[in-house]
Image (spheres, rainbow, N blue to C red):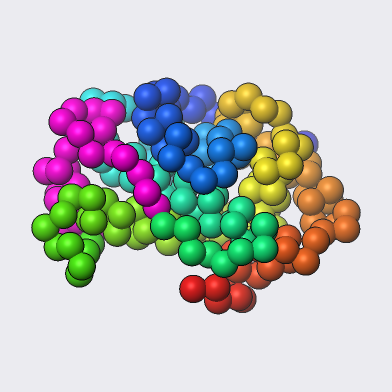
Amino acid sequence: MSTSPDLTISIPDESLDLIRDSMSYSFGRDWLPWAWAVLAQAGDVPAEFDLDSFDYHEQLLVLAGLGNLYDLVQQVANGGDATIEPNYDLIGKEHPHLTEVEIGRYSERHGVVDPEHPESGEGLLGEAAKEQTARVKARLLQLRGASSLLTSLLAARQSLAESDDSAGTNPDAYDGYLDDVLNNQPTVDDARAFAWLNGDLDLG
C-alpha cells in the first residue's frame, strides 16, 4: 500500500516528447513522470512543469538527465557498459526548446564547460545533460534507495507497471514489484545494473 500522497504531475506533452523521442530505450517512456513525481514530492522540482517559467531551462535539463539515467540503466541491464551519451535536440528559438542564451546561462550558473567545443551550444547542452544525470541519480538514490529505484527502472522496462502515465502520480507506484524484480530469479545483468546504480561497479 502506498504511504505517499498522490501527486498531480503536469508536464507539457511537447516538452516530454522532446526527451522521450530521443531516448534510446523508448519502452520505458512512462518512467519519466514517475521520477519527476519523486523529485516533486521532495520539493526538488515543481509538480507543474511550466513552459513559461523563468527557470524552464532548468526543468527541461532535469528531465533530460532523467531520460539519460533511464537509458544508462537499461544499457547496463542489457549487458552493455554505461556509455550512452545524451543526444537531445533541444536547442531552438523558443520553448519548448531551449535557446542558446538559456544554455549559456545554465552552464555559467552550474560551471558546465565543454572543453572540446567551448563555444558550441550543442556541446554545452550535452555536458549539462550529463551533469544533470549525475545529480538526479544521486538524488533519486537518496530519496528511494537502490532497490526501489532499480525496481522502478526494470518494472517500466518489463511492462510490469501500467502503461499509461498514472504511475507518475504516485512515488510509491512501483514498490509492489520489488519482489518480482529483485527476488524472482534476477538475471546477471540485472545484478550488474543494481551494482552500477549503487556505485559498486564502474563501467565508465
Instruction: Using the image as rendered, state which of residue 27 and residue 137 is in the foreground.
Output: 27
Regarding residue 165, the answer to whether it shows in the image is yes
Q: Is residue 97 magenta?
A: yes
x then y, percent, for residue 172: 66, 40
Q: Is residue 67 magenta?
A: no
The quadrant where residue 196 appears:
bottom right
Task: Say if 137 sits above or below 46 in the image.
Answer: below
x then y, percent, for residue 159: 72, 36
x then y, percent, for residue 19: 42, 38
Q: Residue at image x 84%, y 48%?
A: 180
Q: Residue at image x 60%, y 39%?
A: 28
Instruction: Using the image as rendered, state which of residue 36 and residue 24 is in the foreground.
Output: 24
Q: In the current view of this chain or complex, which residue is farthest to the right?
A: 184
Instruction: Using the image as rendered, state which of residue 148 and residue 114 is in the foreground.
Output: 114
The quadrant where residue 29 appears:
top right
Regarding residue 53, the answer to whether it shows in the image is no
x then y, percent, for residue 170: 61, 33
Q: Residue at image x 78%, y 41%?
A: 176
What is the span of residues highlighted in magenta in the rendered image? Answer: 86-110
